[in-house]
Amino acid sequence: MYFVEDLTIEEKLEILSDAAKYDAACTSSGVDRKGVPGMLGNTRSCGICHSFSGDGRCISLLKVLYTNDCIYDCKYCVNRCSNDTLRTSFTPRELCDLTIQFYRRNYIEGLFLSSGIRKSADDTMEQIYLTIRMLRQEYRFNGYIHVKGIPGASPEMIEAVGELADRMSLNLELPTAQGLKDLAPGKTREKILPAMRQIQKGIHGQRQMLLEDKWNGLAFTDKEMTQMSFDKNGYDLALVEPEKKLPGKPGKRLFVPAGQSTQMIVGATGEHDFELLTVAESLYKNYELKRVFYSAYVAVNEDPLLPAPGSKPPLLREHRLYQADWLLRYYGFEASELLSQEKPDFNIFLDPKCDWAVSHLEQFPVEINRASYAMLLRVPGIGVKSARRILKARQSARLDFSDLKRIGVVLKRAHYFITCQGKMMLPTKMDQDYITRNLIYTDRKKNWEIAHEMTYQQLSLFDTMTEIS
């Protein structure tokens, strides 16, 4: 291991952006904050992407590590201390200059900042704090900042960073305590969960203050108050401008207005989908997380406890977990409905909603013109928007299959499970094996594309993309 400080900022960027590419826990900001006179940047609720390209197109987060030097030896991590690799670190000034220069060139809208743990959790968190404080106060940067919290950092450091960042995330990494013990002995749930609870309480406390008295007379509009109380999971304080401070605490910003998230690695250990999904459900219910991210393990290290280097990442399995996570958050499903101890893993060739439906054919077909909203959401091919459109449309007319197509229902999936005015679209045998085979055949091309795409490769500002014929 070689630590080198005498590198150009471009050389550091190449090393530290490449070292950050396996972290999936950044996504849409959840914050819609307009520009403010005298400050640089803004942040929009859409358009914040996972990585960045050489010409700046489409990609708006600078995703980078503060340092890839680390005292921990997590077996799955490319930056573990036992790996013989070149180590370096930004200074707060270098990282601020880089962020502002990229912003002014329209490469990015914000910053996703993570780090290895160079000396201690508090020392690393302090460097992150100094960086984002410099960005906010000296450079007047008002764009989106997502900070990866350091497990084991003190509550004081968590609070200080949370007052400057838009979103924070602490990666749980693995769903079981035994998995952490085997692969990441320096990280424990005792270091991660208290920090998650602190962030949750900080967000919740500010929301309560807002709802009680509009922050002691601060001039929030009705639109702002409605927006701030809308999202039960994230408490997005989306429309609040940074000059609206906490009452009684001059100069203090809103605390983590875009909520918190976490990440779990898929395929590094032997945990089943049921364990991953059950942990995610618990985090949503008990810690009010905004998102749980699932990262297909990329075999970069050689270790007897890990898949062999060169093994194919379980991308299709990762995709199924994201689909199931969506069902938990928006469709009214529970983890125990989708999986069980007896059936602990998803059928990777069938999306989880279809998998549930073919296992519960006794509840189908449902009549589109009478079914409740909750039941419509359980029909494959019907999403949240199309279910709402169905409810609205059938107030004035009896719907048929042509109406459903215009509404946006995916009939190639839905027609097995619905009737319109008592009739099915096609003669269908209500048999589990028959419907399963047809659904798998319908999605065969999409499944192949997901299983073979290299989504874990992050684009680089310095790479030239080669067209594949």
Image (cartoon, helix red, strand yellow):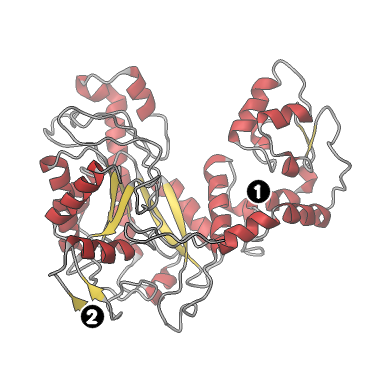
Horizontally, residue 233 falls left or right of residue 385, namely: left
**Quarter in which the N terminus is drawn:** bottom left
Q: In the displayed structure, would residue 267 be above or below residue 390?
A: below
Say what amino acid the circle numbered 1 marks.
Lys
Residue labelled with disc 2 = 1
Return the residue found at the far bottom.
Answer: 304
Residue at 34% of width from left, 45% of height from top? 60
Residue at 33% of width from left, 45% of height from top? 200
In terms of depth relative to the viewer, which is nearer, 411 or 218?
Answer: 411
Residue labelled with disc 1 = 353
| Position of residue 466 measured from the top left corner of the image (x, y, whole percent) | 46, 61
| Position of residue 386 measured from the top left corner of the image (x, y, whole percent) | 63, 32
Q: Is residue 173 visible?
A: yes
Residue at 74% of width from left, 43% of height from top? 412
Looking at the image, tell me whether mark 2 or mark 1 is earlier in sequence order: 2
Q: Is residue 159 visible?
A: no
Q: In the displayed structure, would residue 24 be above or below residue 135?
A: below
The crowd level at tag 1 (other Cα within 10 Å; few <14, some 14-19, many 20+) is many
**Quarter in which the C terminus is drawn:** bottom right
Q: Secondary structure at mark 2?
A: loop
Q: CA distance from mark 2 to mark 1?
A: 47 Å
